[in-house]
Image (cartoon, rainbow, N blue to C red):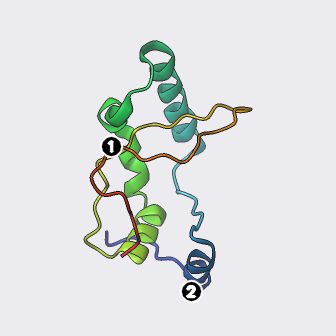
Amino acid sequence: MEDSVLLTDAQVRDYVIHGFVTVQAELPEVFHSDLYAKIESIFESEGNPGNNILPRIPEIHRIFEDSVVAGALTGLLGPDYYLHPHRHCHRNPQGSAGQNMHMDGWSRRCHPTR
């Protein structure tokens, strides 16, 4: 993406040290609240969409296309990265104990940054 905003040296350093970096997409707040409402609606009416979350809510792609998000992904993964096909929703409602470590049904068990 030509208009991508790459991570700063400090952000890359923090990623290496901590294993994650937080970036803020440049999408308006109304986008996020609308997206959240759509996701909640699907969970309430249909249950967990599993790996079909992107086909069910294609607006999620806008997040990956955002210049800040795309820049972070490109900077860390290189220009030819791909979106992993496994995207099952693991929902942890507020106040829940979360989930235990588990292996998903994908043939590659390790997803290292390359």
Q: Position of residue 84 (x, y in %)?
A: 31, 54
Q: Helix or strand or loop: what does disc 1 sit on?
A: loop
Instruction: Note whether 46 is above or below 83 in the view shown.
Output: above
Residue depicted at x 39% and y 44%: 104
Residue depicted at x 51% and y 77%: 7
Nearer the N terminus, badge 1 or badge 2? 2
Instruction: Note whether 18 is above or below 39 in the view shown.
Output: below
User: Which labelled disc corresponds to residue 9?
Assistant: 2
**Which is closer to the viewer, label 1 or label 2?**
1
Choose between 109 and 46: the one closer to the eye: 109
As drawn, is 84 to the left or to the right of 39? left
Which quadrant of the rendered structure holds the C terminus? Answer: bottom left
Residue depicted at x 59% and y 40%: 99
Choose between 101 and 28: the one closer to the eye: 101
Question: Which amino acid, by three-letter code, is at mark 2?
Answer: Asp
Q: Residue tagged by mark 1?
A: 105
Which residue is at the far top?
Answer: 45
Q: Helix or strand or loop: what does disc 2 sit on?
A: helix
As drawn, is 109 to the left or to the right of 25? left
Which residue is at the far right?
Answer: 95
User: Which labelled disc corresponds to residue 84?
Assistant: none
Residue depicted at x 48% and y 22%: 43
Q: Position of residue 75 (x, y in %)?
A: 41, 77
Q: Which picture quadrant has residue 76?
A: bottom left
Q: CA distance from mark 1 to mark 2?
A: 36 Å
Instruction: Note whether 28 is above or below 68 in the view shown.
Output: above
Q: Which picture quadrant has residue 66?
A: bottom left
Instruction: Note whether 37 is above or below 110 in the view shown.
Output: above
Question: Which amino acid, by three-letter code, is at mark 1?
Answer: Gly
How many numbered circles are shown? 2
Asked if disc 1 and disc 2 are in contact, CB closer than 8 Å, the reply is no
